Each structure stands twice: as C-alpha cells, then as structure tokens.
Amino acid sequence: MSRSVVIGSGAREHALAWALSRSGDVIVTPGNPGIAAHGFTCVDAPATELDADLFVVGPEEPLVGGLADRLRAQGKVVVGPGSDGAQLEGSKAYMKEFLAAAGVPSAHYGAFRDEALAIAFLETMQAPYVIKTDGLAAGKGVLVTDDFDEARRDVEDKLRGVVFAGAGSTVVIEEGLKGEECSLTVLCDGTKAVALAAAQDFKRVGDADEGPNTGGMGAYAPMLRVDAVLEDELMGMIIAPTLRELTTRGIDFRGVLYAGIMLTPDGPKLLEYNVRFGDPETEVLAPLYGSALFDLLYGVGAGALTTTPSTSDFAVTVVLASHGYPASARHGDLIHGLGTDGQLAQHREGVTVFHAGTRRDADGRFVTAGGRVLAVTGVGSSMALARNRAYDAAALVTFEGRVMRRDIALAVI
Ligand code: AMP
Ligand code: GLY
C-alpha cells in the first residue's frame, strides 16, 4: 500500500486525491471540508512534517516559493519543480525569454517596466491587444481586448500598481493569437516527458465565451482534434525544445508542464506554461487515468517515468460558481442535492463531485465558500454520455445565484 500527500485545497486536489486513493492512502494538506467528507484525511500541517511515498504539489505559489526543494532536501519523492523550474510560471517575462532561447513558437512580445516604452510598443501592435502582469496573478492578470484605449489604461494601471500591486511591476504586451485553445498536460521526470490527453478549458464566465475571464468554468478531455499526429507535433515543436532548454539551464524539472497552446492557422503556438496541474483540467484528467495515476506520478517524482498513459474514456466537468463570480463571490448559500459525504444525494453512474469552495454550516450542511464552488464530472464511453452525466448531475446540485455554463463540450458531441 502506498501513501500519497496532496498539497492544496481545491477541486484539483480533490480530484488528485480521488485518483491516487485507488492505489493507497491519501492525505491532503490542508484540503477542504468537501474532500474530508469524501473520506480523505485532511490535516492542517506543513507538508515538510508529513511522511509519505509521494508528494504532489497542487498550486503554483508553494512551488515558486521552493516547497518542492525543501521536500526533496528531506529525501522525499515530489511531483513539482523546484523554485528554478517554477519560474516558468512565476514570471511571464522569464517564460517568454526562455521560449525565445529554446526556439518554441509563441506570440511576439515585449516586456516593460517603463510606461512610455510600453505604450510606444503597444502602438506598434494590432488588435486584439494582450496585456499581462509579470508575476503570479491567479490566472486573472491577463487582458485581451480589441479596444486600444482599454489596453493603454490597463498598461498604465498595471505599471502603476493600481491592480496586482507587486505582481504588476513589469508588463508583458503580446501579439494576439487566434485559434482554438488546448491544454496539454505533460508529465516530466527530468529527462523524459509523456502527455496526458489534451483537454479544453472554458475560461470565460458565459456561454459562447461571453463575459470576463475566470479560473475556468468547465473542461473536457480528450480533445479529438489533437490526434496522434498533432500530439507528436506538439511534443516535437514545443515540449522537446523546452526539455533541452531546461537541461541547458541545469534545471531538473520533475513535475507537470502544463502547456496552454493556441492552435493557430500558422501552426501551434505556446500561450503559456504552468508548472502544475490545471484546474479544472485535472477534474477531467484524474478520473480518466484513475488507478494509473499513482505509478505515473511516482515515476515523475523518482525521475523514472516508465509507464505510458492511456485512456479510452471521455470526461466532462461543469463548474458551479457562486453568485457574482468572477467579480465577487457570495459565501454562505445553502447547497441542495449533496449527501453528508459531499457527493450526489441521488447516486448517478459515472459521476463525481469535486469540492472547490464549500464549507459546512453549524448543522453540517454544505454551503458556498468561494468563487468556484464545485466541479461536477461525468465520465463515459463517449463524449455525449460523459456530458449528459455531468449536466444531469449538475442539475441536481442547486444553490441561490448558481453560475454555470451550459455549453461545456457542446460543440464536440
Ligand atoms: P494566461 O493567464 O497566459 O493563460 O492567459 C489567460 C487566457 O488569455 C488564455 O487562456 C487565452 O485565452 C488568453 N490569452 C493569453 N495570451 C494570449 C494571446 N497572446 N493571444 C490571444 N489570447 C491570449
Ligand atoms: N485552467 C487554467 C489553469 O489551471 O491555470
């Protein structure tokens, strides 16, 4: 029996715990009340004080802060890069410089601290304008707009620290890329890399991609457009040069390279790297790989990836967010339709409910406690079946002001 520790507190960590539990015990730190209700031990202790065969770091902040380095210094097997590799996500300016050095195709860009230089560069660009903060901004530091004046104001606000104080002292201005987006989750053991099924994330809050960007309102996998030929191309054009550049820089990257890729008419281009599992992508990937995940992740951490991931199923996840999301998030709304284990009160085949932002009230009932509240995942032998399962189940889980997209995976069934 193995024991795994998962670090984090959202639906991504719930999904990882659920899959790793197929192979043994799982502890989540700190976890959340929905993860605990589902039978996983949640402890509020630093990971460095826990003992396990495998440590999986969920979010990016602790990786940027060197948690994986501290755990490795204790001799532990860890999924997640050290603070050196985590810079790929921690600084967009670093990432862009890295991609240029590696020869990975990505958007033309400039990085600026000086406002006048930034505006002068912006004036040379064409719509859509893409403005990013340099540092970690929880996925919300990106503006994509066709309106030049809005773009200019955003550059000013970011450089003057009006928004994202600290994170915004450098702005990155990028060429706007057009096409379909794809999330490629690549497991990397320091020298070898294997891809999990390509997933699509729905970032805008509203149907048909209307409204502001969010942390992600749903996802599905596999993305059929990414067939074996295209996957080989992505691995050859994007991942292989990245691994070579990591080696050149002396970075032993043992973790998840999550490539956000735009499939443009001129070929695939990398939008960004994240150095951890995606959220909500993990809520579809973890159920697809299930009991294989422990061996895969242990191989990543141990520098000895030997298994090749495969799946023949389909998965769709629908995020239920709270009233006002993403601008604000109302807490305390009573959630109907969940049992005491935090899963559907009325059992449904092929469905799991992953908790992102819930807590229990004085009577033990689940209430909303975050922007993204739950991710409801359906798995099946076809995309249509997975999608029907996810939406049938989501309809059973209700709360005041619930925000949910109706078109996750609609275009691919
Ligand atoms: P990021 O935080 O870099 O993932 O950006 C968030 C979202 O903004 C991406 O998923 C894209 O939808 C969009 N985006 C980022 N960079 C670009 C770009 N250069 N061109 C078009 N859209 C972009
Ligand atoms: N799905 C977007 C992210 O995890 O950053």
Image (tube, rainbow, N blue to C red):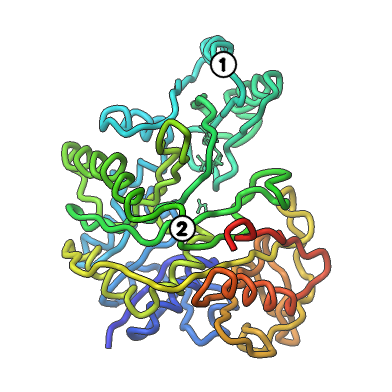
Picture quadrant where residue 57 is located: bottom left
Q: Is residue 354 visible?
A: no
Dot 2: what SS? Answer: loop
At which x and y percent is residue 315?
A: 52, 70
At which x and y percent is residue 324?
A: 78, 54
At which x and y percent is residue 124?
A: 54, 11
Tell me if 407 is positioned left or right of 175 in this view.
right
Residue at left offset 52%, top offset 13%: 121
Residue at left offset 24%, top offset 64%: 301
**Amino acid type assigned to the residue bearing label 1 in the image:** Leu
267 or 402: nearer the viewer: 267
Q: Which residue is mark 2?
A: 224
Picture quadrant where residue 329 is located: bottom right
Residue at left offset 41%, top offset 79%: 27
Real-space CA distance between mark 1 and mark 2, rounded to the nearest whole angstrom: 36 Å
Give the foreground label among 1 and 2. Answer: 2
Crowd band around label 2 with a 10 angstrom C-alpha radius: few (<14), some (14–19), many (20+): few
Q: Which residue is mark 1?
A: 122
Q: Is residue 232 visible?
A: yes
The disc, 1 or 2, on the residue closer to the chain's N-terminal end is 1
**Amino acid type assigned to the residue bearing label 2 in the image:** Leu
Picture quadrant where residue 91 is located: top left
